[in-house]
Image: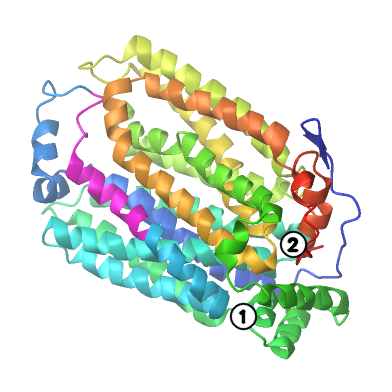
Amino acid sequence: MAWGGFAVAAPGASQFEAKITPIVIISCIMAATGGLMFGYDMGVSGGVTSMPHFLKKFFPGVYRRTLEPGLDSNYCKYDNQGLRLFMSSLYLAGLTATFFASYTTRRLGRRLTMLIAGVFFILGVVFNVAAQDLAMLIVGRTLLGCGVGFTNQAIPLYLSEIAPTRIRGGLNILFHLNVTIGILFANLVNYGTSKIKGGWGWRLSLGLAGIPAVLLTIGALMVVDTPNSLIERGRQEEGKAVLRKIRGTDNIEPEYLELVEASRIAKEVKHPFRNLLKRRNRPQLVIAMSLQIFQQCTGINNIVFYMPVLFNSLYTAVITGVVNVLSTCVSIYSVDKVGRRMLLLEAGVQMFLSQTAIAIILGIKVKDHSENLSQGFAIFVAVLVCTFFSAFAWSWGPLGWLIPSETFPLETRSAGQSVTVCVNLLVTFVFGQAFLSMLCHFKYGIFLFFSGWVLVMSLFVLFLLPETKNVPIEEMTEKVWMQHWLWKRFMDDGIPVANG
């Protein structure tokens, strides 16, 4: 319970009998490959936009500016509307697709929604590889964005629902672990393809995205759907059989009855998006939306983009990619032990200090038309960047998706996840459109801008975010929200709720 800004474990949370079965581990690993696709696309896009042949073909204006170092400052050389559209079209498409994904997740199930995402990804890869002009390239990015919308809608829900309560956080973070592995893989691929002579290396970089796309599609065909989803769609006996199978025990009746009751109340809700606005659902909605906004306001995209400008080397991208993966493993190990709040608060301090230090160094050493940093300062900034990455990777990166996926009651879970994904992609789109101009005008001050946001979001976590570790997903209302010093005031409308 949170009180006066501090939280302790929720009292009286049920612990249903459950073994860590092979089918749960395999299902979670296969489902989490959607994160591999998402991460690879993020990593490869930044790499190909720095390849001369790619810029010359699709963004000749940017290409000419990179050939004349004195023409634009270090902070402004990539400020191009076409390039911004290429980078952010994916997020705009994902934002739109997530509303359709909410329907398929609720009516067709989590598994089929993941399959649809895989198909979108494969089509997007085909268009990108074959692109002959900017329009074709953006069509491919749009299809990939639809895949992102369906993936981010279904997979966090799938992982949270199928995992046993005591390791739910760790298994859910497998999605973000795959995102970081995808980014690292993309950096390694870009390093190799950038050396290919003949100007077709960027096509190979974009084409290799087909590997995680096919893996996701095959995985969606192999995994079982969640008991929550099956029971919600009226397939009680099948849901009970799957629950028995994934829990590895015959003593499933208490959990099964709780899922049936949650499903019964969920079916009474005819308009889940309208239901989200009711007073008792506002705490979950506020937390979910705030986490998505804050996740982008950490400045993670700022750091990712500016590394090549600082170091002119993919080695740094690979090093930070390794740090990203290893730090996410730290989160998998610790999230169900120390809790969500502790990871977020510690990371807030780490990210604030590292971004402030980077701003000071850049303000002193990097001028508009200066060359790269000296080796000593470059190494120091690289260490600070790794410090930032490690903090983000074990906190706001994975937990920004984990916490919303485990807090909504069943009757609004698909709609709530849809809003979560929509807000995330909307904010990412806005930053994608505005970031390059902000960088051009703020210069090194952009790091101070984001460090200020880190301070604000840390205070938000300290006072308003309750702890959700080790609480069954269908008991969040009673054991978490009704115990919080502020949010319990929204739980007094006298209307029965699904969880609790």
Q: Give the main secondary structure, helix, strand or loop, of the magenta stretch.
A: helix
Disc number for residue 473? 2
Q: Which residue shows up at 58% across the image and 78% down it?
A: 223
Q: Quadrant of the N terminus?
A: top right
Q: Is residue 262 left or right of residue 11?
A: left
The verdict on residue 168 being magenta is no
Task: Work out whether mark 1 precedes mark 2 in sequence or the reverse, and give the earlier one.
Answer: 1
For label 1, the crowd category at 10 Å Cα-Cα, with few meaning under 14, some 14 to 19 and many 20 or more, is some
Q: Of 327 and 101, which appears nearest the observer?
A: 101
Q: Nearer the viewer, residue 311 or 340?
A: 340
Identify which amino acid the numbered label 1 is placed on. Val
Label 2: state its secondary structure.
helix
The structure's colour scheme is rainbow
Q: Which residue is mark 1?
A: 224
Residue at (42, 51) in percent of width and height: 425
The span picked out in magenta is 74-94
Asked if marks 1 and 2 touch (Cβ < 8 Å), the reply is no
Residue 292 higher or lower than 461, as above or below: below
Q: Provide residue 147's location: percent of width, then percent of height.
A: 39, 66
Which residue corresponds to the image point at 77% horizontal and 78% vertical from the top-left?
A: 260
Residue type at numbered disc 2: Ile
Name the residue rendered at 69%, 78% in the picture.
227
Rendered location of residue 43, percent (x, y): 37, 49
The C terminus: image quadrant: bottom right
Q: Quadrant of residue 100?
A: bottom left
| Residue 407 as seen in the image, left or right of residue 376 | right
Classify residue 363 by image quadrant: top left
Q: Position of residue 133 (x, y in %)?
A: 11, 58
* Mark 1 secondary-structure assignment: loop
Q: CA distance from mark 1 to mark 2?
A: 19 Å
